[in-house]
Image: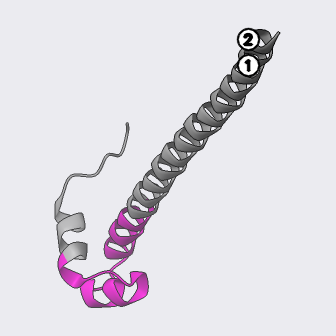
Amino acid sequence: SAIAEMRAEERQLGREEGRQEMNSAIAEMRAEERQLGREEGRQEMQESQQEAARNFYRMGLDIETISLGLNVSAETIRQWINQPSDEGK
């Protein structure tokens, strides 16, 4: 009957819309996870630079040289050197 055909068509359209919604939700979730990964990567890089700055300073390098070598401002290097490290976490 015409009603049965219409219902079948609507059900098929609903399935397709459901798939699209799921795909959108999955894409959004993946984008969020990528963003979190980028943030974690930046944090890890900064922590590595901080550790290197402290090590270079302990080795006797001056702040300007460390700044040039790490491509980080001298003021930031000073802050890193003067803040307590997270050693022994």
Compared to residue 11, the image places residue 66 above or below, namely: below
Compared to residue 23, the image places residue 37 above or below, namely: below
- Residue 19 appears in which quarter of the rendering? top right
Q: Which of 26 and 20 lies nearest the eye of the viewer?
A: 20
Q: Quick one: quadrant of the C terminus?
A: top left
Q: Which of 75 and 4 lies nearest the eye of the viewer?
A: 4
Q: Position of residue 83 (x, y in %)?
A: 18, 57
Q: Is residue 82 magenta?
A: no
**Residue at numbered disc 1:** 6
- Residue 13 appears in which quarter of the rendering? top right
| Numbered badge on residue 51 | none
**In the figure, is residue 32 to the left or right of 62?**
right
Secondary structure under tag 1 reads: helix
**Residue at numbered disc 2:** 3
Q: Quick one: quadrant of the N terminus?
A: top right
**Type of amino acid at the residue the image marks with label 1:** Met
Circles 1, 2 touching at the beta carbon (< 8 Å): yes
**In the figure, is residue 15 to the left or right of 1?**
left
Crowding at dot 2, Cα within 10 Å, few <14 / some 14-19 / many 20+, comes out as few
Q: Position of residue 86 (x, y in %)?
A: 31, 46
Q: What span is in magenta?
A: 48-75
Q: CA distance from mark 1 to mark 2?
A: 5 Å
Q: Is residue 70 magenta?
A: yes
Residue drawn at 60 percent across, 43 percent down: 27
